[in-house]
Image (cartoon, helix red, strand yellow):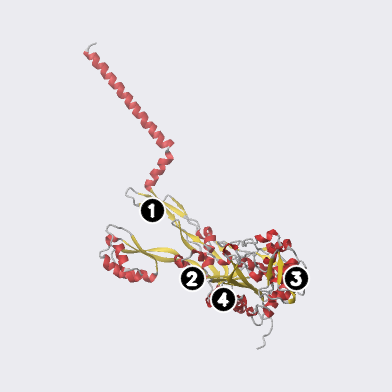
Amino acid sequence: MSRSSQEHHGAADRLTILSIVIFLLAAIIVLKLFYLQVVDYKKYSTLSANQHLVKKELDPNRGQIFIHDYQVSEGASYPVAINKKYYLVFSVPSEVKNPRATARALAPILAITEDDLYARLNKSGDVYEPLKHKLEEDQKKAIEDLKLPGIQLTEEIFRYYPEGDNLAQVVGFVGYKNDQLVGEYGAEGYWQAELAGQKGSYEFERDASGNLIPLAERTKAAEENGADLVLTLDRSVQFTACTALKKMVDKYGAPGGSVVIMVPQTGAILAMCNYPSFDPNNYGAAGDANVYNNSSIFEAYEPGSMIKGITMAAALDVGAVTPLTTYDDTGSEKIAGYTIKNSDGKAHGLKTMTQVLEESLNTGAIFAARAIGPELFRNYFERFGFGQKTGLPLNTEVAGNIGNLKKDKEIDMATASFGQGITATPLQIISAFSAIANGGKLMKPYIVDEVRSAGGKTVKTQPQFLRQVILPKTATTLSAMLASVVQYGHSKQADVPGYYIAGKTGTAQVANPGGKGYSADLSIHSFIGFAPIDNPRFVMLTKINNPKGVSWAESTAAPLFGEIAQFMLNYFKVPPDYQVNH
């Protein structure tokens, strides 16, 4: 083959190889484009968009919480949880010209030591250093007047509670949880979803330099502000009850106490106080997180002799006893190897059922319980709502415990007849006695009167009838017996001159840890009552935990009831039942 022919064939081979390479490269490019544009389109479209789009969350306004203020007018309300504008002061340390002088100027305004501020301001290269949150308007102005280089302020919104510790355990607070602000405890926690609302969002395009292009807005999902709550509580009643409770707790060196006030005909709660409390504006300073719990619904305790009213209700309702039924009080009863005595250790002879309540005789409560038997006794306690949650829409409610009664043993019935061996919350007890005050009708307790959505829709809570626990005539008879307790029995200090008050004390022993007997030193004093008996305007439970230097509830919880009851009757302008002779 000639040289020219060889050169021709070599050129042809190279051209063929080049063509194959070009074809393969083109095929690879086509396949790659197919993969990018079809197979993995969503992924790369999203990556591309993310280089040009900025997403911004829009925070809704949290719903506010109100209570009634009947002292102002029938429909007036008062805010107890609001969104308040504060300020954050921060520094750009790299722009602070004189850290020491700046720290010295800011220290008295921020209540932070000069040395601490200096350390935070003297960080070369740092571009952001928060100094203090929740500054008030006067602090903001004082800082602005200083005109300090590198010191800046920005607005921030925080929850504010105008009533401080007066409603803390009912309302709860808003705190950080996993870097998110959420409602904790009380209404803030239970109604978190409704109060928080729904976040919105904006999507903006940005140019190659990263600058936003507002006119190129892509999408907008509007935020939905949270709903407002209106609680059933009345501001004046709540303040009066809480003030009186604190005074009584302090007087007897008690570690705490509670007051709950309810409208028996509806189940609406007018006041719910616990002491000690905490400041929800500074909840972190409480020290013990247990104080966040609402003890009126969270702490179940052995209620003591108040429960004799429930025992008597059951016995009266089935016709096993009447107010004049008598028994011979020998001072003690022996059951299943146990000896149960009256609280004073004495025998009182022939006594009526009314006198059993007046003198708070344990043996008389056992007599009434025996007249109906364990099964029917348990049934009535369940019908009154013991051993089950009321369903009040606040966080941390517990059910109490009447499990012993399910054994249907006489000894368990006997101890429960005067309030031992079973536990109940203050809310359960007041709910049960509200049924007595309401002609035997048990209403569902509620504390949220209205839910007002941001769109203007208002949902009002309607009173909910649960069941007829006892006959109306039983309720009337028992109310008269309980009024006799206040007039002639161990509850005289609960009396309000001019009114017939029905009520019963309870001085309950405190069980030792592990269930081994009862403490010789500790007791819980309670009083449950309602007024006036013909048409009760309210039912109230007062409770003092382990008071010092006093033995019986008639000296603590009963006078606390009397003080608040007198205010309530005057506040609601309830006409007196009889003329008081001075």
Kindly identify which numbered label has been placed on residue 172. none
Left or right position of 477 against 456: right
Left or right position of 492 against 287: right
At mark 3, the secondary structure is: helix
At mark 4, the secondary structure is: loop
Quick one: label 2 or label 4, which is nearer the N terminus? 4
* Residue 340 in the image, given as x and y percentages of width and height: 68, 69
* Residue 277 in the image, given as x and y percentages of width and height: 51, 69
Quick one: label 2 or label 1, which is nearer the N terminus? 2
Q: Dots 2 and 3: beta carbons under 8 Å?
A: no
Q: CA distance from mark 2 to mark 4?
A: 20 Å
Disc 2 target residue: 164
Residue type at mark 2: give it: Gly
**Residue 454 visible within the image:** no
Disc 4 target residue: 71
Q: Dots 2 and 4: beta carbons under 8 Å?
A: no
Q: CA distance from mark 4 to mark 3?
A: 35 Å
At mark 1, the secondary structure is: helix
Q: CA distance from mark 1 to mark 4?
A: 51 Å
Residue type at mark 3: give it: Lys
Residue, x 26% and y 18% (percent of image)?
Answer: 10
Which quadrant is the N terminus positioned in?
A: top left
Q: CA distance from mark 1 to mark 3?
A: 74 Å
Which quadrant is the C terminus positioned in?
A: bottom right
Which circle, 2 or 1, is nearer the viewer?
Answer: 2
Q: Is residue 423 above or below residue 206?
A: below
Q: CA distance from mark 2 to mark 1?
A: 43 Å
Disc 3 target residue: 473
Q: Is residue 229 above or below residue 483?
A: above
Quick one: label 4 or label 3, which is nearer the N terminus? 4
Quick one: label 1 or label 4, which is nearer the N terminus? 4
Disc 1 target residue: 214
